[in-house]
Amino acid sequence: MLHFISFSRIFDPPLIFFGGAAVAEPLHPIFTKGSFFFKKFFEKLFFMNTQEALVKALKQFQLRYVNDPVLFVEEVLKITPDKWQAEVLNFVAGGGRRLSIRSGHGVGKSSCASWLMIWHQLTRFPQKTVVTAPSHSQLHDALGAEVRKWITVLPQVIRDQLEVLSEQIRLIAAPSESFISFRVSRPEKGSAETLQGVHSDHVLLVVDEASGINNAIFEASAGSMSGDNATTILLGNPVRGQGFFYDTHNKLSKDWKTWRVNCEDSSRVSKDFIKEIENRYGRDSNQFFVRVLGEFPKADEDAIIPRHLVEGAVAREVEPIGGSVTIGVDVARFGSDASAICLRQGNVILGDGVKTKRGLDTMQVVGWVRSEIDKLREKKLELGEVCIDSIGLGAGVVDRLLEEGVDVRGVNVGESPSVGGNYLNLRSELWEKCRLWFEGRDVVIPNDEQLINELCSVSYGYSSTGKTKVESKDDIRRRLGSNASPDAADALILTFASYASRGASKSWSKPLDREIRGIV
């Protein structure tokens, strides 16, 4: 008969496990005969099968790992941490209370944080761990999924003590005294209550994608973060050169232990990924700084759309305004370019991102556009306008679609803008409209890395007459290399061409009046 045993009378802090027959089937390798665990912890149970033997065994478990998370990761989770991960684990075990980690992509931040959360829950009691990120997808599809993955690696006898829910991971025998809670911090509303009011003998606060968290949330949570038994971990790619996360690595660095993890120093990151970012954007680009080196971006006053606006829109949870769908089509002009199609419905880019294809001739692009229109109609979505770049090969695409009776609009981005006096050409005006769309902070885009990087790579300046001038594709190739071309980004800006062609000066939409809570 399976039953729970509470060891609060024995342990400080206690652990809670199955007793009795539950340990009779050691499925995990660390429980096999001859292993350290078998010899030191469970050998007596197979012969005595008593509560007293279990208590003794678990006390040894407690003593072995309570101050050694690295050993816990190696023996229980069966993985060897990288050097920097071991430093982070030991820093927390040694009483470190404030740590902030910036890095490139894919170095193992989420894994390290997951190990700490699981170790914290299994070796401290009572304890409360609160995890937050700017959006539901960033929280649950990234770090939350990583925590759940490592819980499945735990020995069955330990795993059975945890109840894994969508918003919490609870210790079954004491769910209100020991849990990991997942809470979304929505940056556009402040959500000050996300990290407030967290009280326990042991508190662990984990903030993922910390660059995207509003400063007001950190200010309001100062009480929780400053508790004597509270440890706060900030994680993220350093996408913004401002904000609280940035400050912890700069003017507040005396109060925080900081790490920077470079993809070039990590065995977990593909060399092909590093080379791709270098070839596409250059080592001196902000894309390489942020995605590979784990450095905050250089001052990017010349970028028409700041990176933090684009990153903040990824998977943001907003109320879709609906309406008709506008299609933007950028037709490849050179062999290295790609043709691209973007579908935007009000404040949302539809699908998984902007679709791109290489090597298509005029008729193949025509067929592709017709196919996308047919798919919209099958979904009963209203089609607004189809805006196609009519420079070069795009003119042939426009002509053919019009011949076939498809209502499309040819857009020459090199011609005069619809709003005279402010922009050098229509291309500059459309990019400005796209920037204002992001600036509203009530839009959402998919996690399309190509689109994100292209949007952030286009610069602007001023003509001799003082008009805003966004660099052309040819200028971008000269600056970033022959393979650099913002095809996906240009497809998106073409979706704003209908407003420009009508001479409208109004904003793309009215601000949405809605209330968004900070915890879901």
Image (cartoon, rainbow, N blue to C red):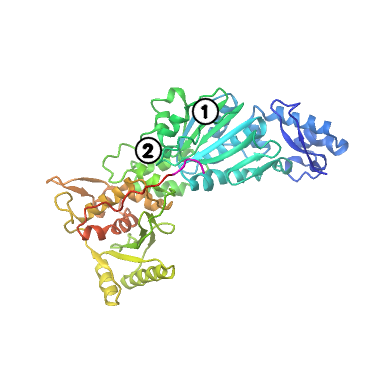
Res. 98 mark: none
Identify residue for label 1: 224
Q: Residue furthest bottom?
A: 404
Q: Position of residue 92 (x, y in %)?
A: 57, 28
Q: Secondary structure at mark 1?
A: helix
The residue type indicated by label 2 comes to Arg
Does the residue at mark 1 contact the one at mark 2 (Cβ under 8 Å)? Answer: no
Describe residue 454's horizontal placement relative to residue 420 as left or right: right
Label 2 neighbour load within 10 Å: few <14, some 14-19, many 20+: many
Residue 154, given in percent of the width and then of the height, sits at 68, 42
Q: Residue at x 47, y 45 (%)?
A: 135
Say which residue label 2 marks: 240
Q: Quadrant of residue 363?
A: bottom left
C-alpha span from label 1 to label 2:
25 Å
Name the residue at 77% across, 42% down: 32
Name the residue at 60% across, 33% down. 128
Residue type at numbered disc 1:
Ser
Span colored in magenta: 516-520
Task: Reply yes or no: does residue 31 show up in magenta.
Answer: no
Looking at the rendered structure, the secondary structure element under dot 2 is loop
| Mark nearer the viewer, 1 or 2 | 1
